[in-house]
Image (cartoon, helix red, strand yellow):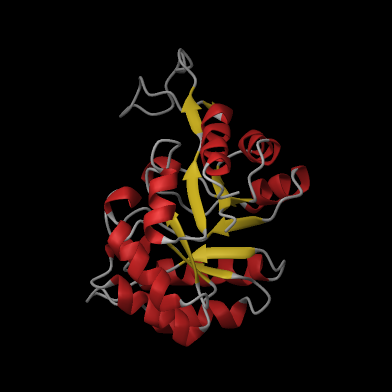
């Protein structure tokens, strides 16, 4: 079994570090602190130009949950059409007010981006029933499901991750996310059987707060990050030592 590794990135530097450390793919987003929102087309193009490994793009129009209002749905579908035109993998999703999959939304995205691989993202971890989300993915031909197993951390959602892997039977790739690191990655993979792990690898640059804050609400927060190459390499080494790469 070879476990794939994807790194969530917000910059060209992070994407290049992921590729250099041996990652299989990157997911491009912005504002990672809120779980990520849709990045600019310029950033996506710059990263795809800089690295040769496959890149997926997060389509999440707002940071305020996964039950989208009409304006957010309009933005999401427009982005799906634009990025889908380039056949890039899309990482997206939406829920109905009752916590079930918004199948109409997912069907529309698939129609707008017929050449794109589509991942249902961690909206599944806010759903009423993760298994219902997988059933929707299988019914609609969604390629991939990114999840922590409905728990804050993947190591806490291992039992659900295993159920998802078993039910998917390889027809929808289950990728584990949520607090993945070198200390827990092998246990998560071995206990759940997930064929892929996903995590961010960045660290804040100390002492980089702006002299003149651009946000009066958070004047002392640093928004400067650098790639955490050591984290990627440590996860890779753990998987190699366990015979999982």
Residue 22 visible in rendering: yes
Residue 177 visible in rendering: no
Q: Is residue 108 left or right of residue 113?
A: left
Q: Quadrant of residue 13?
A: top right
**Looking at the image, how many numbered discs can be counted on the residues?**
0
The residue depicted at 43 percent of the width and 56 percent of the height is 176
Which quadrant does the N terminus fall into?
Answer: bottom right
Q: Relative to 225, does residue 70 appear above or below in the rendering?
A: below
Q: Is residue 208 left or right of residue 27?
A: left
Q: Position of residue 86 (x, y in %)?
A: 72, 66
Q: Is residue 245 left or right of residue 92?
A: right
Q: Relative to 174, does residue 216 appear above or below in the rendering?
A: above
The residue depicted at 37 percent of the width and 43 percent of the height is 179
The residue depicted at 51 percent of the width and 26 percent of the height is 224
Between 190 and 23, the residue placed more toward the observer is 190
Q: Position of residue 37 (x, y in %)?
A: 46, 52
């Amino acid at each position: 079994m070879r476990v794939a590794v994807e790194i969530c990135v917000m910059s060209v530097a992070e994407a290049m570090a992921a590729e250099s450390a041996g990652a299989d793919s990157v997911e491009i987003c912005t504002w990672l602190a809120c779980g990520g929102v849709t990045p600019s087309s310029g950033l996506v193009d710059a990263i795809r130009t800089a690295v040769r490994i496959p890149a997926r793009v997060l389509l999440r129009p707002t940071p305020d949950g996964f039950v989208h209002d009409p304006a957010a749905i309009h933005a999401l579908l427009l982005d799906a059409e634009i990025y889908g035109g380039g056949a890039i993998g899309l990482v997206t999703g939406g829920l109905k007010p009752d916590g079930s999959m918004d199948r109409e939304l997912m069907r529309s995205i698939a129609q707008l981006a017929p050449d794109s691989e589509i991942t249902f993202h961690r909206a599944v971890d806010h759903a009423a029933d993760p298994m219902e989300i997988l059933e929707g993915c299988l019914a609609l031909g969604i390629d991939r499901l990114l999840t922590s197993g409905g728990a804050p951390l993947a190591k806490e959602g291992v039992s659900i991750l295993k159920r998802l892997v078993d039910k998917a039977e390889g027809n929808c790739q289950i990728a584990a996310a949520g607090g993945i690191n070198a200390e827990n990655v092998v246990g998560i993979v071995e206990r759940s059987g997930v064929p892929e792990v996903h995590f961010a690898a960045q660290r804040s640059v100390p002492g980089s707060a702006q002299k003149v804050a651009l946000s009066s609400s958070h004047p002392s927060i640093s928004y400067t990050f650098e790639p955490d190459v050591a984290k990627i390499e440590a996860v890779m080494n753990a998987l190699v030592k366990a015979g999982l790469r």
